[in-house]
Image (cartoon, rainbow, N blue to C red):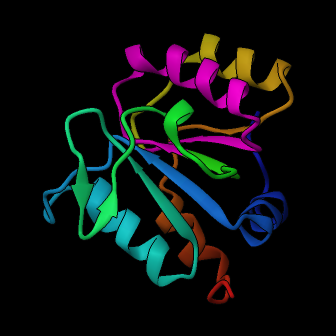
Amino acid sequence: MSLAGAALYDLLAAAHTIAVVGHSDKPDRASYSVARYLRDAGYWVYPVNPNLRSLDGDTVYPDLRAVPGRIDIVNVFRRPEHLWQIAEDAIAIGARALWTQLGVVHPGAAQRAEAAGLVVVQDRCIMVEHRRLGLPRHS
């Protein structure tokens, strides 16, 4: 399913928490800079990476099921072969949406997530879309 501008705007405007799966600790990586942008835009960002324990003073969670708070959007920076399990975890925790970054596409995982009621956005950069839509800073 491809969301139109108004639906993307509504999704991003209503969200408060975003889990960044595959969050890197390297500032030159897209996952790091996109997560920083989302924090600066006012979202609460949960970093998810099984290889890290903390990042910039925040706890890093090994997987989505370990995150203690409610997650509105699961933003994925992992290769497509990991997406099925991430979709299953997003469903299990009651996330509202599954968003995959540029180049991350898995039709089966997307169909599974949609069938479970999640909004699915694939192969789009959440930072680019946020800027393009002109969303204000979250409060």
Give the residue displayed 79% in from the left and 34% down from the top: 118
Q: Quadrant of the N terminus?
A: top right
Q: Which picture quadrant has residue 8?
A: bottom right
The spot of residue 13 in percent (x, y) is 76, 72
Give the residue displayed 83% in from the left and 58% down from the top: 7
Left or right of residue 57: residue 124:
right
Q: Is residue 30 above or below residue 57?
A: above
The spot of residue 55 in percent (x, y) is 24, 61
Left or right of residue 28: residue 9:
right
Give the residue displayed 48% in from the left and 71% down from the top: 38
Q: Is residue 12 above or below residue 135?
A: above
Left or right of residue 16: residue 35:
left
Q: Is residue 50 above or below residue 73?
A: above
Magenta-tinted stretch: 75-101
The spot of residue 96 in percent (x, y) is 77, 44
| Residue 84: in magenta span | yes
- Of residue 82 and residue 104, the one placed in the foreground of this image is 82
| Residue 22: in magenta span | no
Q: Quadrant of the C terminus?
A: bottom right
Give the residue displayed 48% in from the left and 21% down from the top: 83
How many numbered tags mark residues here? 0
Left or right of residue 18: residue 8:
right
